[in-house]
Image (tube, helix red, strand yellow):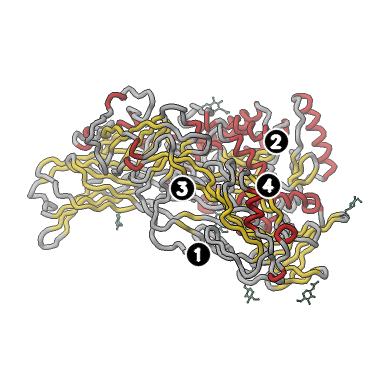
Amino acid sequence: MIYSSNMNNHTLFSVLIAIITILSVTHSTLATEVSQDGRAILINGERKIILSGSIHYPRSTPEMWPDLIKKSKDGGLDAIETYVFWNSHEPVRRQYDFTGRNNLIRFLKTVEDAGLYAILRIGPYACAEWNYGGFPVWLHNMPGIELRTNNKVFMDEMQNFTTLIVDMVKKENLFASQGGPIILAQIENEYGNVMAPYGDAGKEYLNWCAKMAVAQNIGVPWLMCQQSDAPQPMINTCNGWYCHDFTPNNPNVPKIWTENWTGWFKAWGGKRPYRTSEDVAYAVARFFQTGGTLQNYYMYHGGTNFGRTTGGPYISTSYDYDAPLDEYGNLNQPKYGHLKQLHDVLHSMEKVLTYGDILKTDMGNSVTVTSYKYNNISSCFINNDNTSVDATITFQGQNFTIPAWSVSILPDCKNEAYNTAKVNTQTSMKSKISNEAEQEPSSLSWSWRPEIISSYVKGGIGEFSADVLLEQKAVTNDTSDYLWYMTSVNLDDKDPIWSEDMSLQINTSSHVLHAYVNGKEVASQYAQGHYHFVFYQKVNHFRKGKNLISLLSATVGLQNYGPFFDKTPVGLTGPVKIVGKKSNNEVVTKDLSSETWTYATGLQGLDNKKLYSEDSAYALTWRNDRDMPINRKMIWYKTTFEPPLGTDPVVVDLSGMGKGEAFVNGMSIGRYWPSYLAGKDGCSLNACNYRGRYDNNKCVSNCGKSIQTEYHVPRSFLRDDVNSLVLFEEFGGNPTQVNFKSVRTGGACANAYEGNTLKLSCEGRYISAINFASFGNPTGVCGSFQKGLCQGPNDAKTILTKTCVGKETCSVDVSEEVFGAASSCGDEIKRLAVEIVC
Ligand SMILES: *[C@@H]1O[C@H](CO)[C@@H](O)[C@H](O)[C@H]1NC(C)=O
Ligand SMILES: *[C@@H]1O[C@H](CO)[C@@H](O)[C@H](O)[C@H]1NC(C)=O
Ligand SMILES: *[C@@H]1O[C@H](CO)[C@@H](O)[C@H](O)[C@H]1NC(C)=O
Ligand SMILES: *[C@@H]1O[C@H](CO)[C@@H](O)[C@H](O)[C@H]1NC(C)=O
Ligand SMILES: *[C@@H]1O[C@H](CO)[C@@H](O)[C@H](O)[C@H]1NC(C)=O
Ligand SMILES: *[C@@H]1O[C@H](CO)[C@@H](O)[C@H](O)[C@H]1NC(C)=O
Ligand SMILES: CC(=O)N[C@H]1CO[C@H](CO)[C@@H](O)[C@@H]1O
């Protein structure tokens, strides 16, 4: 293999030449050689700095891909990385889907057309908050299978799918060895984090993965992330919040960071996690300071979990991830711009970082100078890891101040080109504009119909029966979120449990459980973040004779992480009991777990009749009368709307709704659950302090609120004239507040340091006014800036008004030449604070 690490440079070179010769005979496009050594990935023999970002193709639309990828390139990325999502491509065994959002080849070609590299994580296990880790649930139900271990049934299926993907990609000449964009591929994923419980079988499986991958003969190196014992020639890589302390398991492979988490995902009922730009930049700069040469942002664009693709349980439909590009593909400023500046500086130092000699000097108190020397070039990083105290150090006769928890980069070891804590990029504020086409939410007119459940709750009619409680995935293959469990029980007043005070007690691994007795609703409960809960509810209407108990179990995304995550049960795990309390307080229970249970998969309207579908045969069964039910369970609502004008991204605000699934023109835009509010405590009123180690609980907002009231409706789902919105409401809601909005930049703020050029932009609109501008030591935060004690003599507001108002973008040098000498500021580094209105 060309990337075998035990070859010397000379052999490597000859092998490469041989391969290029072979390839150039078969293909007209010129092959790109990808190899590696202890410092970096080499492209055509040259060591490279590679900045990559994750974009998962099914989380946006093919119409969005060119713009997302162009913005990634403009943001200074060299490569786009994606998983391959097995369950989207092979929903039924040997029946494939590579259309629309699943068009992997079109996505890779879009990356190629933009002139970027691609990193293909075939997995096929995908650790991405994706339903069931990307495994099709039919796989789980194959006889004799064990997932992610030395099991022939599983390995045959994994090899079959991996080979299918590799063959498709090869056929289109997309590997770099064929002249295509893919420079690296990945097999398995973070298996090292979970391997121990699998014992020897896990180790055997890992070795098999490596052999199977190598045999695919793709001509570019394979990665295994979080795998300290990755067999050669797999390159093991690091994932995490920080990776500067990581060392690969082989001195001849470079230090690669495959997942640098730019933020974190959101969960229903949870608070909103975010990660500051200062801290992401700090983590990246520390990685390159300590010899890293390839790193990937997880995510660069998070996007949307359309349909039922989200993992779980309880992961939200928005997968925004606080990434540099927001859910809709807009720039998330200042993160995008602050990282772009870092990328530009790192690229400018590519040669010295990949070929230079490294010298580390400890300056004490958590300050280190790392200098890189190559020929006559010297470049330096100075980091201050102290979490509270800024450091002033003297280095090569010059004084430098390094703010706490920051890295300064000096491409010539003399002048600071970048400091991770000094954000010179504007902070954009998104405003949501109501739909001009529909003036008021109340102008949407709704029709409705009930979901028909009577055959289950009154008739107990299902598809088959069994004398046990069955696990939900085993019955449904996850073809629906819903499974009915129904049983009959005879009661009379001689029954020991018969009493005035009878309850249902159900141990369940359902994510949501709705209970009905004798056709009448009892209650709906859910687990609140856990995988298992006990449903408990008093039932006043048990009767003498036959009683029908109908339990509807719902999933909200299947478990996708952890050892044996695939075996996490869902559905009624039992026991199911009737609990009777006698007047003397004696408690008697009747266990129904081994009664005869009748099963029915799915809901009639949702899964059989597909009432959301544009060409549903049931179009005439909707009612337009004035008696539209509000806050009632199991109701369908439907309306038509004209889309907001323009090209800005569109969202539908589902405030007032309970829980369910939403469809636009027959396409699912995902599950919704705006009624589930986050806990009230834990949000700080102050901005998050970026200093100190980050984790996903450190910076949260949105306490006491819904994690997601707005749902992305991709423009490509919409027609110019009339569109339909259909809501399946499971818990009860009121659609009269539902409305469509477009998302645009409403304004921006900046607080840039002297010596920088500040770029201001309304991202496609015009700057209409300058609300505030001051050069000196202004105080306050965006929205409440105030002039400081010192400032330049020229009126900053007038200067900015002249330069910027009426333009889409403008640039201004933050300097005394422009704003006048602010000598009263003394030694303090001067800043320009600006607030613009779009
Ligand atoms: C589920 O998948 C298994 C294994 O592929 C298959 O045998 C079974 O028929 C499927 N069941 C349903 C309900 O689709
Ligand atoms: C996958 O398995 C099917 C049989 O189920 C076989 O026809 C097909 O050739 C296999 N594909 C690959 C790429 O091995
Ligand atoms: C380094 O050397 C090269 C060639 O000798 C020269 O062109 C270049 O200007 C020098 N750079 C610096 C920073 O001295
Ligand atoms: C930061 O520096 C201060 C002052 O030198 C010192 O007291 C403190 O222990 C340091 N803290 C950390 C976390 O490095
Ligand atoms: C650096 O700082 C020290 C201590 O504050 C001071 O004595 C020295 O003059 C400074 N050097 C330069 C070049 O400014
Ligand atoms: C059912 O849940 C109760 C309450 O959490 C627990 O005490 C009991 O052990 C559970 N029973 C089973 C069989 O899981
Ligand atoms: C999945 C995983 O590796 N998580 C780790 C990521 O890094 C953070 C902090 O470095 C750890 O706390 C997580 O366990």
Ligand 5 sits in quadrant: bottom right
Q: Determine the residue positioned at 35% across, 35% down.
A: 444
Mark positioned earlier in the residue sequence (3 or 1)? 3
Mark 1 vs mark 2: give the one in front: 1
Q: Amino acid at mark 2?
A: Gly
Q: Is residue 688 left or right of residue 3?
A: left
Residue 709 locus on image (x, y percent): 41, 46
Q: In the rendered image of this protein, does residue 414 appear above or below residue 769?
A: below
- To which residue does mark 1 refer? 686
- To which residue does mark 2 refer? 115
Cα gap from disc 1 to disc 2, whole angstroms: 42 Å
**Few, some or many residues within 10 Å of mark 4 (<14, 14–19, 20+):** many
Mark 2 vs mark 3: give the one in front: 2
Mark 3 vs mark 1: give the one in front: 1
Residue 718 locus on image (x, y percent): 46, 30
Mark 4 vs mark 3: give the one in front: 4
Q: Amino acid at mark 4?
A: Leu
Task: Provide the secondary structure element on which disc 4 rests.
Answer: strand
Mark positioned earlier in the residue sequence (1 or 2)? 2
Cα gap from disc 4 to disc 1, whole angstroms: 32 Å
Residue 184 locus on image (x, y percent): 67, 40
Q: In the rendered image of this protein, does residue 219 appear above or below residue 431?
A: above
Tag of residue 565 = 3
Relative to the observer, which residue lies in front, 695 or 147?
Answer: 695
- To which residue does mark 4 refer? 51
Cα gap from disc 4 to disc 2, whole angstroms: 14 Å
